[in-house]
Amino acid sequence: MSQITREEVAHLARLSRLALDDAELDGLAAQLDVILGAVAAIREVTDAADVRPTTHAVPLENVTRPDVVRPSLPRDAVLAGAPQAEDGRFRVPQILADEA
Amino acid sequence: MSSTDLTRRTAAETAAAIAAREVSAVEVAQAHLDRIAAVDDRVHAFLHVDAEGALAQAARVDAGELSGPLAGVPLALKDVLCQEGIPTTVGSKILEGWRPPYDATVTARLKAAGVVLLGKTNMDEFAMGSSTEHSAYGPTHNPWDLDRIPGGSGGGSAAAVAAYEAPLAIGTDTGGSIRQPASVTGTVGVKPTYGGVSRYGLVAFSSSLDQAGPCARTVLDAALLHAVIAGHDPADSTSIPLPVPPVVEAAQKRDITGLRIGVVKELAGEGYEAGVEARFAEAVELLTALGATVTEVSCPHFGYALPAYYLIAPSEASSNLARFDSVRFGLRVGDDGVHSLEEVMSLTREQGFGPEVKRRIMLGTYALSSGYYDAYYGQAQKVRTLITQDFTRAFEQVDVLVSPASPGVAFRLGEKLGDPLAMYRQDLATIPSNLYGGPAMSLPCGLSDGLPVGLQIMAPTMRDDLLYQVGGAFEAALPAPVPSLSWES
């Protein structure tokens, strides 16, 4: 049985913000189907039912530091790596489309 | 002394010669830059060479401004670690031309120790791969046979070390990206304990698994590098606030009498090449002859490490790579005043990411989506607990575990590109340590069909010293094979 449909792949691409073309959608549908079939093996692990999930190898506790003002990276150095900057800020493409 | 001799020396020898003023750091740096110029058109280990910066740093060492056990020793830095002002691409088009405004903690510690940074090494895009063929800038070639892969994702770092372009390199290991390249290039590679080396400034793939570590030609060199980069860093909240294990002392001990070594029953058999199993069996005999007590140990859930990893790592990646949104750094495509922000993001990511990165983002998005979360990501995290329990129980019986580092020797370029699962299986033996968080090493244990085979040693969390103790003793008894580099002539 197929693990994933082409429609689901197209939906995932939208969620992932990837403008995949038709050939990529076809290819990924087939590949993800094979990969999901292989990783589904973990569902066989029946003794996992009662164990706690591990999110991280190190037991994490909240790490705090003194609330002291420190210099940050120079603004111009950071903006120099941006695709576009303007007036000391990141310039973004239009967010609100014309809906008039 | 000829420049060839300078590039063949170990890091420890080079550091000693510079400290004794037998050779200058500038001469050593120039010898390695010359070597890169001579061979890297065929090896393609480097994405960027910083000759000017390397010579300037070497001059500072010669002027006495910087000192330490590795002062003046050249190093190749994997292109996943930020170095201020130097291009950092992570092997991806999406970051082409980006120059970080700051140093990663690893980079800063190397600079402060007087290590000479030669340049940035090639890698599978975003460290996703086992062959370096997923680099957007073309594959790296294995110095043992240029038609074969150097492993991945850190194939550039391993190949640079194997081809004498650098005595040392930094790699990162999320599922085996330091150890598998070490295995197939006949070099030494170590994944330190998770949290042992700071991740600050390391471009994230899978944050709960990523760990930077040393690549070298000898166990002692790897230990010297480990000692320079490891230790607590307040800038990384997962950094362990404990002293660095005594790795250098352990590497020099060369005694494993009475040490208890466990052979992992599940990391053998199906999927492992006969030649790899033969060299591994001989390695186990040698460890016994050296005085260790060797027993077989069962880790029953290790067989599920690969599927758990290929759910956890892509899930974390799909989240981490959301930051490549065409706003703060890197590529932007389709910003023509007509396309919306969301469309520009989608077009940018479509053009900027390669096929393997897209595959993993999609897989991770699926595993995290509602309706599948419990069955996939949630279950994988529970399996991670069981794998950790396997390690904990095993380390009640033995001090370290051993296995082959990679199920096979270096395969041919292109051989597995069309079969993602076959590529993923290269990490069969290395993934368990990433899920558990403990340290692991690959070091050479002979040849199969003329190609290197790696022995993997796995130790408990924060016992990285045990890797070096076993590795140092093993290497003294069985020196690493040396590549013929017949393609040079």
Image: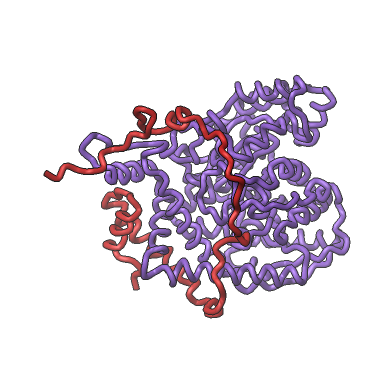
Residue A95, image quadrant: top left
Query: Residue A70: x percent and y percent?
Result: 57, 36
Residue B28, image quadrant: top right
Q: Which chain is red?
A: A
Q: Which chain is purple?
A: B
Query: Residue B476: x percent and y percent?
Result: 83, 48
- In-front residue for pair B78/B63: B63
Q: Residue at x 33, y 50 (%)?
A: A17
Whether residue B275 sits left or right of residue B5 in the image: it is: left
Q: Residue at x 11, y 44 (%)?
A: A100
Q: Residue at x 45, y 59 (%)?
A: B315
- Number of callouts in the render? 0
Query: Residue B164: x percent and y percent?
Result: 68, 34
Whether residue B207 sits left or right of residue B454 in the image: it is: left
In this picture the colour scheme is by chain
- In-front residue for pair B156/B381: B381
Q: Is residue B152 above or below residue B68?
A: below
Quadrant, the N terminus of chain B:
top right
Query: Residue B437: x percent and y percent?
Result: 63, 59
Quadrant, the C terminus of chain B:
top right
Q: Residue furthest left?
A: A100
Q: Is residue B467 above or below residue B108?
A: below
Can residue A42 be seen from the camera position used here?
yes
Q: Residue at x 37, y 43 (%)?
A: B325
Can residue B452 be seen from the camera position used here?
no
